[in-house]
Amino acid sequence: MSSQVVRVEQFRKGSLNNIGREANDPYRGKIKHRNEDIDQSRNHLNEYFLMPNKSLYGEFKEISKDMNIVNSEKLKKNAIAFEGMIITSDQEFFKSLGWVPGEPTPEKVQDFFKQAYAFALAEIGFKGSDENILSAVVHYDEKTPHLQLYYVPVVDSWKEKVYQRDENGKIMTTGDRTPIPARDEKGKMIYNHVKDSVDRRINRSEFWKNKGGQTSYSRMQDRFQEQIGQSWGLDRGEVGSTREHTTKQRWQKQQLDEELERIKQENERLKAKNAELTILVSKAEQTISEHKQAYDELLDAGAEEYQKFQKLKAENEALSVEIKKLKTEKGNLGLAKLTLEGEIKEKTETLSQKDQDIEKKTETLNQLETDLQNSKNSLEEAQIKLKTAKTELEPLELKNKALEDEKAKLTADIAGMKNYKQARQRMMEYLQSVSDLVTGNHYEAEVNEGIRRIDEFENQYGDQEQ
């Protein structure tokens, strides 16, 4: 019988970009080191209940702004910023509903995931809404169809410590600057219970505490079974299970851990069996010794004891066969023990290598995220400088045009002045010639004519010179 699967995993803020590329198009299927099960030829079959308008990181920032989440930019490095939920079953269940990999999705399968999404909103949506949902998609491009949601664990009600304050209202601290909590007359710490605050917070512990605390996962499994699983013929699964969805590598590590534990248990069982066989061999050898002694006594006793001797001899032969069988089984157990010890060593080395690989890849991802953020900051600074330069360029272009107009005017004025100077030069030469000819009053008319012409030129070009 197929079982329901409802799992939850936590993520830090630094995982937003990588998780976003794995969960959503157009990057889905291109990150081979995280999920090798993605078949890119079936990406088009995926169905979105909520597709991010931006990257998962951009969606996180927008939700934080829209929901007035006051601590989204102040989270500690190891704090949980968002979570993922998986709802699914095994391949046999979906195939029983008509699902065929790579073919259009049957209506029954779509109905199942519609009910699953409605259940998820009721469980982890902020007051039953999709306000805090980063992404919600049904993946049909992997081995088993599954609904995958990413959401921000937002709360508007929480419990916070009250701290001692001095006469100025400043929080009092110890010598190492640790805030001193306030206590009541019985010595118990005092808490302030915040309800329905408009300043929301990301707080995973309070988020799940409001849903049942340590039993919240188990209760959620029960509710899914009652509301959906039972009507679809799905088994509840392991009661009390709080297992969370893992990535491919972590799942492999988990399987190796479980296999190692199984081998260790088998080894202990073989050790116990070996001890038990050792005791049986010891008892059998003691019995043979007793029978041999009895055999010797029979030889001494004579013919009347021959029948008892024959009986004891047969028993002795049977015990010898049993001892041989037990020794063979003991030898086989010894070989099995050596084989298991070799497997334990091999599995342990594999686990150690997996841990190292996960650590290296985590460091690489963190560095890539840091480099990406630095590049974004540099781009934003360059865009601001470009905008400032464009703003400063506009008045300079206007000033340059005005200068070009003034230059054209000055060029025209200079040309006019050159014409005026040439004319004036000719008049002066004319007057000089007249002056040279003047010897008496009978040339007075010619002189007066020269003066009149000079005045005429002065009136015509004087304004241009000014």
Image (cartoon, helix red, strand yellow):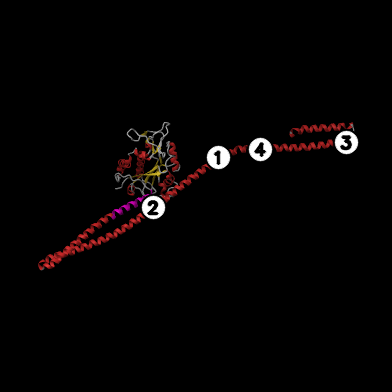
The span shown in magenta is: 247-267
Determine which residue is flagged by label 2: 354
Queried whether the magenta region covers residue 251, the answer comes back as yes
**Amino acid, disc 3:** Leu
From this view, report whether residue 67 is shown above or below residue 374. above
Across and down, in percent, residue 16 comes to 43, 44
Q: Nearer the viewer, mark 2 or mark 1?
A: 2
From this view, report whether residue 131 is shown above or below residue 253. above
- Left or right for 141, reference 328: right
Magenta stretch: dominant SS?
A: helix
Q: Nearer the viewer, mark 1 or mark 3?
A: 1
Q: Which disc is residue 387 wearing?
A: 1
Mark 1 nearby-residue class (10 Å; few <14, some 14–19, many ≥20)? few
Measure the alpha-carbon separation of dots 2 and 1.
49 Å
| Mark 2 secondary-structure assignment | helix
Mark 3 nearby-residue class (10 Å; few <14, some 14–19, many ≥20)? few
Measure the alpha-carbon separation of dots 2 and 4.
73 Å
Which quarter of the image is occupied by the C terminus? top right
Question: What residue is at 73 percent from the left and 38 percent from the top?
Answer: 415
